[in-house]
Amino acid sequence: MGEENIYNIQWFPGHMAKTRRMITESLPDVDAVIELRDARIPLSSKNPEIERLCSSKPRIVVLNKSDLCDPDELPLWIEAEKKKGAVCIGVDSSSGKGVSTVGRSVASACAEKIERNRQKGFSVRIRAMVVGIPNVGKSTLINKLAGSNKAKAENRPGVTRDRQWVKTDYGFDLLDMPGVLWPKFDNKICAENLALTGSVKDDILDIESLSIVLIDRLKSRYYSLLAARYKIPQQQREADAVELFELIARSRGMITRGNEIDYERASRMLIDEFRSGKIGRITLDRLNRCLI
Ligand code: G4P
């Protein structure tokens, strides 16, 4: 199992240039920005420049996929963001939990502008956009916020898909095109976290090394989840990541005809089960790194 391939992910300066361009082009048209992060990796899924680029607008930080993160960690991350002065909400866009709080927060963040418009007799609607790294749930959240309004917009024949606005039920319009931010890959742990949660393409990763990284991360903080799911005896707690991997593969019968471990199949199974939350609710980032 090669160790080095996972680090083929590079931080390309061109990515940040794209992010800057996207923000610079769309920001003048909106009153607020909804910044999505992955609640399992609130730090690694944060674009390092977003705060600076959007400093002129109210920003609502959404920790999405909160159904998959450690429920004990989520309030701590939200509290840490709030201490920095941000509006921060844990959301499960798939089920819609927390989505209405996001809607109300955008409206209240723009309350002053709404009031100014009202006093001047303008009926200008507030506009917002959703930004975040690939696969963090931007489209899912947009669909939930737009609700039935979205379906209406899509059904209109001949309407160009370019920069459409959809009405929400919360008194603002939403740019119907999420802004893709590039994550920061220059830190090994951050790159691993993005790979583990599926924010970067699998085909540029060595899945076997990635699964060892996963076990290595889980074995200290989430050993009991691993042990329960894959029926690993408690006395194997001191086993290293490769030994645990082999126990897991064997317990799932992922063995070749020659009685060898089927590393590829077992790796895919482990990564898939982690990503879909089957191993349990897990947060990979460590909060104390955020507070440094
Ligand atoms: P993007 O626009 O930011 O690229 O992300 P998108 O909305 O396409 O969502 C990426 C994947 O994440 C989708 O799964 C979506 O269902 C899932 N997802 C989005 N929000 C949440 C959430 O809060 N919780 C959970 N558990 N999943 C979420 P997929 O497997 O790619 O597609 P599908 O399963 O929806 O078919």
Image (cartoon, helix red, strand yellow):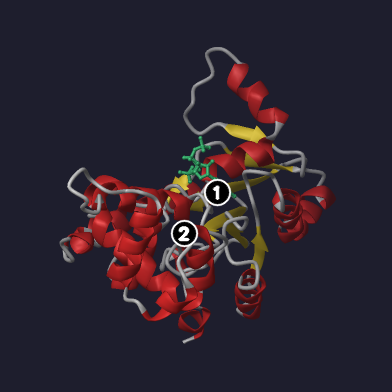
Q: Position of residue 83 (x, y in %)?
A: 64, 80
Task: In this rendered view, identify the residue nearer to me: 190 or 121.
Answer: 190
How crowded pointer 1 is (Cα within 10 Å; few <14, some 14-19, many 20+) is rated as many
Report the label total. Answer: 2
Quarter assignment of residue 155: top right
Quarter assignment of residue 208: bottom left
| Outermost residue to the bottom | 292
Which quarter of the rendered picture does the N terminus lie within? bottom left
For disc 2, the marked residue is 230
- Disc 2/disc 1 C-alpha distance (Å): 38 Å
Which residue: 61% across, 58% down? 66
Q: Is residue 233 left or right of residue 9?
A: right
Secondary element at tag 1 = strand
Q: Is residue 143 left or right of residue 279?
A: right
Secondary element at tag 2 = helix
For disc 1, the marked residue is 130
Picture layout, residue 149 above or below residue 246:
above
How crowded pointer 2 is (Cα within 10 Å; few <14, some 14-19, many 20+) is rated as some
Task: In this rendered view, identify the residue nearer to me: 240 or 126.
Answer: 240
Q: Position of residue 59 (x, y in %)?
A: 60, 61
Picture layout, residue 25 above or below residue 58:
above
Task: In this rendered view, identify the residue nearer to me: 114 or 44.
Answer: 44
Q: Position of residue 75 (x, y in %)?
A: 67, 72
Q: Amino acid at mark 1?
A: Val
Query: Is label 2's Cβ within 8 Å of ligand 1?
Result: no
| Residue depth check, mark 2 versus mark 1: number of the one nearer the observer | 2
Q: Looking at the image, do the residues carrying marks 2 and 1 touch, with CB atoms under 8 Å apart? A: no
Q: Is residue 292 left or right of residue 8?
A: right
